[in-house]
Image (tube, rainbow, N blue to C red):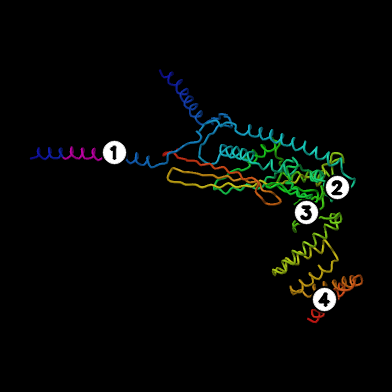
Amino acid sequence: MKTKVVTTRPLMVLALGALALSGCAPQVTRIAPEQAIDLSGRWNDVDSRMVADAMIEQSFVSNWVSDHMRSHGGEAPTVIVGTVRNRSMEHIPVETFVRDLERAYVNSGAVQVVSSGAERDELRAERLDQQEFASTGTRAQLGMEHGASYMLQGEIQSIEDREGRRRVVFYQVDLSLVDLESNQRVWVGQHKIKKYVENPRIRF
Amino acid sequence: MFVDDRRAASSVRVTNQFTVMATTRRTATALFTGTVLLSGCGPTLVPVMENGQVLPDRTSAVVTQAGADVQLERSRLADERSLTGATALATCTPDLCDAIARGEIAIGMTEAQVMAATRTTGDAWDVRDSSGMTTMTARSGLAAPGDAVGEVAFVSLQNGRVSAYTYREPQGYRTVTSPVDATLAGQAAARADALVREGDEFAAAGRLDLALDRYDRADVIRPGDPETTLRIASTLDKQLRPFEAIMRYQLFIHQMELEKIEARGEVAARIAEAIARARERVLILEQR
C-alpha cells in the first residue's frame, strides 16, 4: 500500500506541471493578410488597407493622368512622394498605404514614381561614389535624374469621442497631388473611417 | 407574556424578510428597466465590416484596367505624334528641322512643326482660325505645353506660318516676333526689361529692397545698361546708402559718356541732362 503512494505522486506532479506549462506557451496561427481582425480598436492593417484601396480607386478614376498625357504628348506623369503628416493622437505608420499607392502607380504603367528623401540621398551617394570607382562604361551619369511633375502630400486626422467604456474614433485621410511648378492640386483623395469600440465590463 | 413576545418578534422578522425581498425585487426590476431604457438610448450600429471577415481584393482590377486604358491612350497619342512628326519633317527647311530636333519653336514653322517641336499632339491645343490668322493656345483645363525654352502660352500663325509666339515666364509673358528675339541675347534683353518693369512697380509701392533686388538681377542678365545702373544708384540713394550710391552714379556717368559719343540730337540732350543730375547727386553725397 505504501509503495503505491510513492509511485503515483511524481506522476501527478508531472501531469500538473505539464498542464501549467502548456498554458504559458504562445499560440501562433498564421492567417491571411486579407482577414480583418480588430483587437483594440486602434489604427491597424485593415484601416491602412482600406485607405490604400480607396486612394488607388479615386486616383485612377480621376482624369489627372490622361490630362497630363494629353498636354505632354503621351508622356506619363512623374510623382514624388512628399510628406504625409500624422495629426492624430495615435502612432500611425503612413508608409504602408503610401507604398501601396506607389506600387499601384508603378505597376499600372500610368504613373512614374521617383525616389524621395533618404532613398534619394542614398542613390546620390552611390552615384557620386561611382564617378570615382566605377569604369567609364558602367558609370551612372550625374544630372540625369528624372524631375517629378507632381508631389504627393497628405495628412491624417482623428477625432475621438469617449464615454465610459464606449469610444467612437473617426479618422480622415486626405492625400493630394500638387503640381510642382504651379502649386495647383490636380487630384485630391479622401477616405474616412469611423469605429465604435466597446470595451468589456471586466478585463483580466 | 414571554410567549407573546417571541411571537411578536417572529412576526417582525417575517415582516422584515418580506420587506427585504420586496425591496430587492423592486431594485432588480428598476435596474432591469433602467438597463432596457439605457440600452434603447445607445446608437443603432450599422457595421460595414465584421470582425474576422476576409476583405476582397478591390484594387487589382482597377490597376489593371487603368494600365490598359493608359496604354491605349498612349498608343493613340504616339500614332498621332508620328503622323505629325512625319508631316513636319517632310516640309521643314534645315533651320526649322534643327529647331524641331532641339525641341524649340521658331518663326516660320507650320502648325504640325509647332506640335513636333513641343512634342505634343492636337489634344494639347485649342486652334482658332480667323481670316488667315491662326492662334494656338493650351487646351482649356490642361497644363500649357512647352518647348525646350519654356512654357508656351500661345502661338500666332499668319497664312499657316508662325509669326509670333509667347512664353509664360516668372517675370511675365515674353513674345518672340523675330529670330533675334529667340537668341540668348534677345531672351536676356526681354527678361531684363521685365525685371526692370517689376522693379519700377516695387519702387512705386515703396518696397525699395525688392526694387533693388530686381534691378540687380536685371543688371546681371544685361550688364552695362546705363538705365539699370541709374535705377540702382537712385534706389541706393533713397535707401540712404551714399557710398554705394556714389559708386553707381559714377559708373552711370562713365557708361553715359560712352553712349554720348555715339548718340546724336535729342537723345544726346537727354543723356546730358541725366549725366548732369547724376553729377549733382555725387557732389551732394560727397559733401555729406
Whether labels 2 and 3 share one chain: yes
Q: Type of residue at label 4?
A: Ala
Compared to residue B218, the image places residue A147 above or below, namely above
Q: Which residue is mark 2?
A: B99
Q: Earlier in the sequence, mark 2 or mark 3?
A: 2
Which quadrant would the C terminus of chain A be assigned to in this image? top left
| Between discs 3 and 4, the one toward the N terminus | 3
- Cα separation between marks 2 and 1: 94 Å
Tell which tag, 2 or 1, sits nearer the viewer: 2
Q: Is residue B277 magenta?
A: no
Badge 4 is on which residue?
Answer: B278
Q: Are marks 4 and 1 on the same chain?
A: yes
Of the numbered discs 4 and 2, the one sitting upstream in the chain is: 2
Disc on res. B29: 1
Which region is colored magenta?
A: B12-30
Q: Looking at the image, is mark 1 or mark 3 earlier in the sequence?
A: 1
The answer to whether mark 4 and mark 2 are in CB contact below 8 A is no
Q: From the viewer's perspective, is A69 left or right of A2?
A: right
Is A116 displayed left or right of A9 in the figure? Answer: right
Q: Nearest the camera: B78 or B155?
A: B155
- Element type where label 3 sits in the image: strand
Q: Do tags 2 and 1 sit on the same chain? A: yes
**Do labels 4 and 1 touch, CB within 8 Å?**
no
State which mark lies toward you, 4 or 2.
Answer: 2
Any mark on residue A134, and which?
none
Q: Tag 2: residue type?
A: Ala
